[in-house]
Amino acid sequence: MVAPAAGEATDQLSIVTVGHVDHGKSTLLGRLYADTGSLPDGKLEKVQAVCRQQGKEFEYAFLFDAFLEEQEQGITIDTARTFFRWGHREYIIIDAPGHKEFLKNMISGAARAEAALLVIDAHEGVQEQSRRHGHLLSLLGVHQVSVIVNKMDLMGYDQATFADIESEYRDFLGTLGVSPERFIPVSAKLGDNVADVSGNMPWYSGPTVLDQLGLFAKPPTTEAQPLRFPIQDVYKFDERRILSGRIEAGRVAIGDRLVFSPSHKSAFVKSIEGFNVSPATTVARAGRSVGVTLDEQIFVERGEVASVEMTTPLVATSLRCNVFWMGTRPLEMGRRYLLRLATREVACEVAEIHGIIDASDLEARGKQRQVAKNEVAELTLQTRYPIACDRYRDFQATGRFVIVDEYDVAGGGIITEVVRDEHTTLLEQARERDLGWLTGDVTPDERAINYGHRPALVLLTGDANAASLLARRIERGLVSDGRHTYLLESENLRRGVEADLVASAGEEIARRFGEVARLLLDTGLIVVSTTSAFRTLDTEAIMALVHPSPVVAVHLGRENTRDARDADLVFAADGDVEELGTQVERALRERGILTHEPTGRSMTPYTNYAI
């Protein structure tokens, strides 16, 4: 038995143990606690005495079960967690007694594992269940993994058996993108390589299981990471506009230049605000809820993520994810859901399902178009608007999300990669444009107060003739009411496109539209446009180009099209133009775009808007 190390615990690590029910997880943990002196005084002798009274052989698995019962009295989270300290580290050991419980714990965040011990029976070798456990760890984003090859005593401590298992399972984990730190041959029952080095396997010179726990790296503290500051709300006090939220990672200081994603707006921190906070506070760190004021009044809304240059989050509309579904109704392709990430909410849908595992039995499912309750899926999500995010392995707070089905939180997930799609190039161009944007002395708020409205794009899709008629009605009606409005004819953007560029005209028109619309919106205008000249350009791409200015999408014509499904308003193509224009104006008021009556009218009301 090794002697316990002295000293205060300086960090804490959560480790999950997984493996088939008969492969010796409980025996391994029981032996680990016994050999490190982590059991309460007399617990070992008590369990041994009970075994003698019942006439059964003592097993170290009984110690773990007893230890679990002992600790259960002092915790309320779940009964699959035990605690012990060794050296300068405190360990939270998360046992996975059942797949449903494992899934539930990992999703809820009550036991986020930072590393894993995966147990394989040397006598049985790599089984299908072993592969499924490895797959599940990969889906959950646990990448620090060590494989414990147990019951080596049953194989006569044979090196060749161990080497075969290591080679086979290492190759399998590699296909999942998981690189195990090491394989450790043990006999949990006899204590070989658990806490003490075994003399039965001189061919193995690596660490024991206890040593391996200490070798697992502790992820960097959130304060040591680059800044991630999701904006929760915006408050106005006297002349100050305070952006509030919780700093999820990093630190923010007066004088820092913040970049807000996905809008790409930037400004310098003027002050740090908070309740019962000294005005002299100059720095706020991860874990604190604070407010900041900026040196200029840029328009930033809830859901933006503040960071610093060179370490900004990813911005995308297509996300490769692992999703854990708990909804009563299945997660279906083509159905619209709400994705919540940090403080951002955006409509989304499943673009593709790559693979499914049933968490109740770890059975892999074939190619399907829906994800049922208690299933874990690898899939691609498409968001309606650009969203700021990170890969889960880089930032937990901005790499995990929940999915809302109507009014219920029905699933949770983690982002594994951002997928480049047809919008990616446009988003990158918009980011470069906006980060270098030079502003004047008139702020967006001042323009909104003067004009009686916020800038916005009214985008009409569908029947070209009906859309053109309605666009002119909207422009004339808003201008007659004193609103600063401009009709941006998409056909004009085609002018000057060379004949030999016809194949790429759609992308070039998109770029031109983004630049022109961005300029007009920056002046505070309400821009009205149609998509009749875009052809290959969809509404989501346009929204990506002009974000964060709001877009009101209006579709005229058939309801069973993608544009209709993405639209805020859907009208029949032969509807009364005057009435439809009134409905659009009502929608602009409801969206908070028309904020108040303008101080004067820029032109006399005129209703003869025929083309």
Image (cartoon, rainbow, N blue to C red):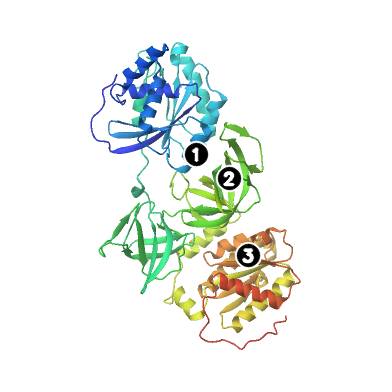
- The residue wearing badge 1 is 104
Q: Amino acid at mark 2?
A: Gly
Tag 3–tag 1 contact (CB < 8 Å): no
C-alpha gap between disc 2 and disc 3: 26 Å
Rendered residue at 60%/77% (across/down): 486
Q: Quadrant of the N terminus?
A: top left
Q: Nearer the viewer, mark 2 or mark 3?
A: 2
The spot of residue 45 in percent (x, y) is 32, 17
Q: Quadrant of the C terminus?
A: bottom right
- The residue wearing badge 2 is 327
Q: Nearer the viewer, residue 605 or 262?
A: 605
Does dot 3 land on a helix, a strand or a loop?
A: loop
The spot of residue 183 in percent (x, y) is 43, 24
**Residue 82 seen from this side:** no
**Around disc 3, counting alpha carbons within 10 Å, would you say few (fewer than 14), some (14 to 19), or many (20 or more)?**
some
Rendered residue at 56%/68% (across/down): 515
Tag 1–tag 2 contact (CB < 8 Å): no
Tag 2–tag 3 contact (CB < 8 Å): no
**Around disc 1, counting alpha carbons within 10 Å, would you say few (fewer than 14), some (14 to 19), or many (20 or more)?**
some
